[in-house]
Image (spheres, rainbow, N blue to C red):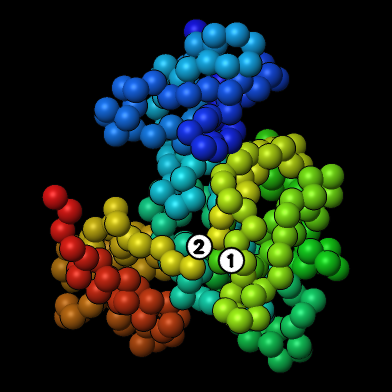
Amino acid sequence: MTEGKIIKALSGFYYVLSNGEMIQCRGRGVFRKNKVTPLVGDNVIFQAENDKEGYIMEIKPRRNELVRPPIANIDQAILIFSSTEPDFSPLLLDRFLVIVEYSEIHPIICITKADLLTDNERLKVNSYLEYYRSIGYEVILLSSKSEEGVNELYPLLNGRTSVFAGQSGVGKSSLINALNPELQLKTDEISSHLGRGKHTTRHVELIEVCGGLVADTPGFSSLDFTEIEAEDLGHTFPEISGKSDECKFRGCLHENEPKCAVKTAVENNEILKERYEHYLQFLLEIKERKPRY
């Protein structure tokens, strides 16, 4: 029995890195029986039949996990969003932030394609980014082509396992290529017919970049809050969580309750109104979610 880390999952095979060697493994039937799926990032115990093939026997306890992209034991999430082509979407960014915060993964916001912004567009995007910084998020504005801001990522990746996630067509693979040109990950342009990015990454894989492990993942156009309950949502918004203790009622959902400190903070421009509106939209989605049986 040997311990290793799954760094790629593809077509029912799990590629386990152990002592510098790659072993192609299958999962034991007991995982299917117990409805447990090995994930990229899992630390596992495996039994090798030879020096290239084996079976995963045990999955070690996970520190955290994401459903989309399916990955485990992540130190930080690099959330990649474009400033233009496709346009910057604060709503979609907030969806990702909620999922990452709920999973207790440290987020870093990266806004790509800065070289394509006009001066007026840059001012608008920067106004959003300054707010995210004010509530504690690390934000980097960068361009893979001009390499603006790319060097700020180097020390943040070293020694950590990071997931690169975000909207399709925003330049995730291009950014990883800029960080490590030897990789030459496949990239594609925006689809002019659909107006959104074409998916160029088909599976999750951990790649060595800048002294750490980085997951290049498929892009997503939406995220569902399948695991999050209404009372948990406020804790995924740092500025709302920070005001919650001042609300009159314990368990306040900051919706229709009287003497709500969060609503007062929105009225006083202490909390960005658009972020609060996103919170209410997500809260409604969670309340209207069909119960699971």
Q: Position of residue 101 (x, y in %)?
A: 43, 55
Residue positioned 48% across, 17% down in the render = 55
SS under mark 1: loop
The one nearer the camera, 176 or 34, is 34
* Kind of residue at badge 2: Phe
CB-based contact (under 8 Å), mark 2 and mark 1 = yes
Residue positioned 14% across, 50% down in the render = 293
Residue placed furthest toward the bottom: 120
The one nearer the camera, 25 or 98, is 25
Q: Please indicate whether residue 159 sits to the left or right of residue 116 in the image.
A: left
Q: Position of residue 276 (x, y in %)?
A: 37, 78
Q: Which mark is residue 168?
A: 1
Residue positioned 70% across, 56% down in the render = 173
Crowding near pointer 1: few (<14 within 10 Å), some, many (20+)?
A: many
Q: Please indicate whether residue 94 sits to the left or right of residue 193 in the image.
A: left
Asked whether the viewer can see residue 158, the reply is no
Asked whether the viewer can see residue 186, the reply is yes
Q: Position of residue 77 (x, y in %)?
A: 56, 51
SS under mark 2: loop
> Residue 86 falls in which quadrant of the image?
bottom right
Q: Which mark is residue 220?
A: 2
* Kind of residue at badge 1: Ser
Decide: is 216 above or below 230. Answer: above
Q: Position of residue 150 (x, y in %)?
A: 78, 59
Decide: is 6 above or below 100. Answer: above
Q: Please indicate whether residue 167 sits to the left or right of residue 33 in the image.
A: right
Q: Which mark is residue 276?
A: none
Crowding near pointer 2: few (<14 within 10 Å), some, many (20+)?
A: some
Instruction: Report the Cα–Cα distance between label 2 and label 1.
Output: 6 Å
Decide: is 172 above or below 247. Answer: above
- Sequence-first disc among 2 and 1: 1
